[in-house]
Amino acid sequence: MQDFAEAFRLAFSLVLSGDADLFEIIWLSLQVSLTALLISCVIGFGLGTVVALSRFPGRGGVIVLFNTLMGLPPVVVGLLVYLALSRAGPLGVLGLLYTPAAMIIAQSILITPIIAALSRQIVEDLFCEYDELFRSLTVPLHTAMAAVLWDARYSLITVALAGFGRAIAEVGAVMIVGGNIDHLTRVMTTAIALETSKGDLSLALALGIVLLAISMTVNALGLSLRSTAGRQAYA
Amino acid sequence: MHDVALKLSGRIADAASSDAATDAAVLNAAALLPLVVRNLSFRAGGRSLIDALDLEITAPGVTTVMGPNGAGKSLLLRLLHGLIPPSAGEVLWAGMPPDREVQKQQAMVFQKPVLLRRSVADNMDFVMKLAGAPDVERRDSLLQEVGLLPLSAQPARLLSGGEQQRLSLARALATNPQVLLLDEPTASLDPASVMTIERIVKDASGRGIKIIFVTHDLAQAKRIADEVVFLHQGRVAEHAPAADFFERPTSSVACDYLAGRIVL
């Protein structure tokens, strides 16, 4: 019990002292996850909107696929990206394995289906509401898409926050494709796993505290957006 | 049918001439008239909801579509506007089907207002942008007309039911329609909101906009209608000038309806 208390004390002192190694790991984690989020939002919102607003053979299958891929196991994604980026793989010539770029790719693959599936549902629901009005007004498709995306912005930001939460907390995929290399590909989750296995609980706890703080901030942001939307009757 | 048109056209023309002359954007509803509906049918779930319906509307003014619940009033309005395709038959506005070009000259107000998740002013701007650049002066003038100018910065969805419907009406008028289709726009509104909407509709009719107004409120139909189309079981049971319809209904279902008897 005393060891735990000491570990917590050390963890807080690491955070409060602005330990350089700690903040390097935090900074890399944020860089990787935010970049992955940006890529996933562009692809996911685009795919979600197209599937929501169009009708084509096999659309139901695409929706089932999106929903299924929401539960993609990170280690499986890590393995597939590893195989693709390894020297013998189809993208081996790019030399991306064990770099932050590989981690970004893995996280993007993990969260794109989440963003696509959730945004598809949000856009489709809102479009159903507007459908007769838009057809009555003969609104061009691109204008309708822009209007729906704009009006659904609060819900879509919440989706993006959910995607970010998934990315920043993920460990399996980035461990496999990043390799957890110190000062190069070590992020918070992989560092926690490593330091715990080494028995250095203070650094692991310090990172855990930061990870929790980020998660809480993201959730608070989401809640704040929802209540803002509710207050203004946009939701 | 021709008699209905003749009786109405003279009356409407008198009422409209004074207002229309002063309106900068003089509207010409006649450009989309006559409305001819031939053998129109719509089937869903194995039931015939509109059944080989024939109708011809040639006169401007306010045409109210009446009938008991389930008669097909709202469905007919959607078919006339081209929002849903018929199972059979055709709708022709001045000889043209209700395609995008015809729809652009019409506007529809739904029973449940469909408002964008934006402010009152932004809802207006959205439709005005479709026709070109938003005209702030005209937007404010329309909002003033429906009594919503002081609320122009408010989120549209925070408005009361009556205010939302008035905004829907102002937004529809912002598109400069030649024909305005209204699907029970005053259902479940308080008397003051009903009177406001009726005034706006009459003003619009006076400016030359053809109005097709679905209602099952007899008193309202008496106040605003120039002619009445009475529907029963997906067919036109009676089509007559309003005065004739209310004083001398010819069909038994219309007689029962006007007498307050249950019409199945």
Image (spheres, grey):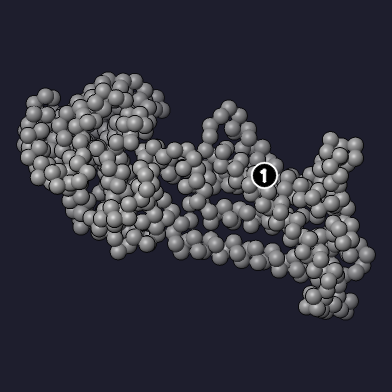
Which quadrant of the view contains residue B206? top left
Q: Is residue B109 visible?
A: no
Chain name for mark 1: A
Above or below, B172 relative to B195 = above
Which quadrant of the view contains residue A160? bottom right
Element on which disc 1 rests: helix
At horizontal 57% and vertical 37% (from top left) the residue drawn is A51
At horizontal 46% and vertical 64% (from top left) the residue drawn is A231
- Depth check: give the residue in front, A203 or B234: A203
Q: Alpha-carbon neighbours of circle 1 within 10 Å: few (<14), some, or many (≥20)?
A: many
Residue type at the position of mark 1:
Pro
Q: Is residue A19 visible?
A: yes
Which quadrant of the view contains residue B34? top left
At horizontal 36% and vertical 50% (from top left) the residue drawn is B134
Residue B43 position in % (x across, y down): 36, 25
Residue to which mark 1 is pinned: A113
Residue B55 position in % (x across, y down): 21, 25
Above or below, B99 relative to A216 = above
At horizontal 21% and vertical 35% (from top left) the residue drawn is B29
In the image, taking residue B152 as reference, residue A97 lies left or right, namely right
- Depth check: give the residue in front, B263 or B57: B57
Above or below, A213 relative to A38 = below
Residue B208 position in % (x across, y down): 17, 40
Residue A115 position in % (x across, y down): 63, 48
In the image, taking residue B168 as reference, residue A218 lies left or right, namely right
- Depth check: give the residue in front, A122 or B106: B106
Q: How many marks?
A: 1
In the image, taking residue B126 as reference, residue A89 lies left or right, namely right
